[in-house]
Amino acid sequence: MQKKTGFDSFSTTLLVSPYQNHESIISVGKELAKKYGIEFVYIDFRVGFREGQAKARELRIIYAKILWMYIFRGGKVLMPQ
């Protein structure tokens, strides 16, 4: 993956939810990292989850319950298209 894309690392927004099994996500992330030669970045984004939901409701922001992969290149986060 890294050779084809030039990405340094990747992560996922699944790490935002307190309902996800972080240990499983880490395990799969590490497997994919090894397979594709790109670093998996684990950050526990659960801090502030409830506040974020409340703020979204307050601002009437609609958010989808979908999986996003975040890709990092040169220390910059590249948002999915």
Image (spheres, grey):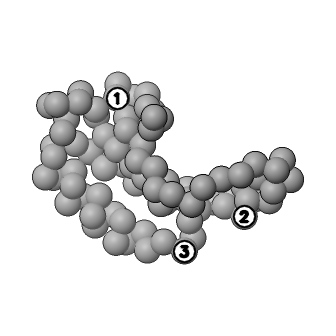
Are the two marked residues, 2 and 3, in contact with CB atoms closer than 8 angstroms? Answer: no
Comes first in the chain, label 2 or label 3: 3
Classify mark 1: residues with Cα within 10 Å, few (<14), some (14-19) or many (20+).
Answer: some
Classify mark 2: residues with Cα within 10 Å, few (<14), some (14-19) or many (20+).
Answer: few
Give the residue number, with chain letter if any, for mark 2.
Answer: 50
Q: Image quadrant of residue 10?
A: top left
What element does badge 3 sit on? Answer: loop
Q: Position of residue 23 (x, y in %)?
A: 37, 71
Is residue 32 shown left or right of residue 68? left
Is residue 1 shown left or right of residue 24? left
Tell me the residue at 71%/52% (across/down).
62
Tell me the residue at 36%/65% (across/down).
25
Are the two marked residues, 2 and 1, in contact with CB atoms closer than 8 angstroms? Answer: no
Q: Position of residue 55 (x, y in %)?
A: 80, 53
Q: Amino acid at mark 3?
A: Tyr
Q: Image quadrant of residue 46?
A: bottom right
* Residue 55 seen in the current view: no
For the N terminus, which image quadrant? Answer: top left
The disc placed on residue 73 is 1
Comes first in the chain, label 2 or label 1: 2
Give the residue number, with chain letter if any, for mark 3.
Answer: 19
The disc placed on residue 27 is none
- Rounded to the nearest angstrom, the CA distance separating label 3 from label 1 is 29 Å
77 vs 67, nearest the viewer? 67
What element does badge 1 sit on? Answer: strand
Tell me the residue at 13%/52% (across/down).
35
Against 12, residue 76 (above or below) is above
Tell me the residue at 23%/30% (across/down).
5
- Rounded to the nearest angstrom, the CA distance separating label 2 from label 1 is 30 Å
What element does badge 2 sit on? Answer: helix
